[in-house]
Image (spheres, rainbow, N blue to C red):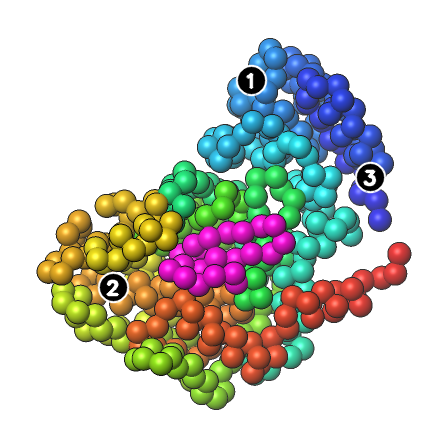
Amino acid sequence: MQAAQRTVLVVDDEDVIRETVREILADEGYRVIAATEGAEVLQLVAQEAPDVILLDIWMPEMDGIVLLKQIKSVHPDARVIMISGHGSIHTAVTATKLGAFDFIEKPLSLDGLLATIKRACGDARREGPAAEARLRLHGAAARSSRTVVAGGGDVRQKTLKKSVVACGLGLHSGVSTGVILHPLPEDSGIHFGGISGDATVPAHLDCVRSTDFATSLRRGGVVVGTVEHLLAALHAYGITNLLIKMYGEIPIMDGSAIEFCRLIEEAGVEEQEGACPEIVIDRTLRVSGDGPEEIVIEPAEVFTVHYHLRYPSPVGSQEYIYVHRGAESFRDQLAPARTFGFLRDFEKLERMGLIKGGRLGNCILVDEERVINTVLRFDDEFVRHKILDIVGDFSLIGRPIRGRVIARMTGHTDNIALLRRVAETYHVPSLETAARVQAAAEPAP
């Protein structure tokens, strides 16, 4: 099915790129106009009111960022997609803060380009190329689960009202990184992707790649690390549809989820028409390790996490019960709790190539006697952070869960193991099953 007649302004001083993009978009049913320099762009924007502007950052007479500022100052609602062959996450963040709808890298991917334009036009739900089908895959899992997950109520799906950005270091990579959060239509799901705008990896249990020291996801060539703090915040605010662009690893920020809460509140939460069914736990499920580790989920009226933690002094024995009463309870009780580590473990982690981004300001560092680098935000900040991790990991089932989690000395591996038991017990469809459901539901060409 071709796109509705929309106007796209292509701005690029390279003839080959400009004409190639023009031909591709024309074949898809778009009306395409083109420009090569700033004055002409501003004139065409005023005269033609294009639905989308594709704007190259590197222009001979006027830098694309400068031109973006001028376009947004005169036409604040213009949907501008920035394109760069020499960009970075910082360039992407700068463009997004200035009002760009999105940022994609050269060489351009056909699927990624078309999917981004469709989102900018509000046509992301239209039938389209393979990348769009991949983007809907997680949403298909959500729809098919409505027929197999029984006993729960429905809550509304949600996304953000606008795109927002944040920068920081990756905890394990040590690389300067950032995230750009883009709203998505209902039934899309939460997806992580690179700046190219092409392949994405769903925030889904099937895509868990590693649970060593953090939770990382992988699908195809897309790998994203340390997702649990951001996902915990999204889950607490009920965000079900979102595109998260980044380079490799989600920034650690201050080691907690509080900055992600502020980012969500800055964007605003938009309730959507689609429903998101609960999984209601009606039996006890248990995962145990060889040592003291154990995690259980059992019936309860509201999502609750009861965690027992015991480490040598100075951490000691800590216990906390978190009852989820909405975003405010998460923001106040769990989100400020930072990740922690022991000084004796740092050398080992460094030999493993991990925690390259560990800084005195983004974790709680403990030696044999005391916390050595900060003042605790809560007396029991350690156990609260373990619960924060559980909330983030449990979001990977893609559904709100009504039940009580009881955990003792567990980590990401145990969380994911129990979540897989939940998915199996309550017949939550895999991505592969969702793909078959989606293919069967779509009309023949």
Element under label 1? Answer: loop
> For the view shown, which residue lies furthest in the front direction?
351
Residue 55 colored in magenta in the image? no
Label 2 with label 3: CB-CB less than 8 Å: no
Q: Which residues are magenta?
A: 208-232
Q: Is residue 52 above or below residue 43?
A: below
- Any mark on residue 382, and which? 2
> For the view shown, which residue lies furthest in the right direction?
445
Q: Which marked residue is nearer to the observer: mark 2 or mark 1?
A: 2
Q: Is residue 309 visible?
A: yes
Q: Nearer the viewer, residue 367 or 134?
A: 367
The Cα atoms of the two marked residues, 1 and 3, are separated by: 29 Å
- Any mark on residue 16, and which? none
Residue positioned 88% across, 61% down in the render: 444
Residue positioned 63% across, 61% down in the render: 138
User: Residue 30, image x and y in percent?
Assistant: 80, 35
Mark 1 = which residue? Answer: 63
- Any mark on residue 28, and which? 3
Label 1 with label 3: CB-CB less than 8 Å: no
Residue 227 colored in magenta in the image? yes
Q: Is residue 406 above or below residue 11?
A: below
Q: Earlier in the sequence, mark 1 or mark 3?
A: 3
Element under label 3? Answer: loop
User: Residue 28, image x and y in percent?
Assistant: 82, 39
Residue positioned 61% across, 39% down in the render: 196
Query: What kind of residue is marked 1?
Result: Asp
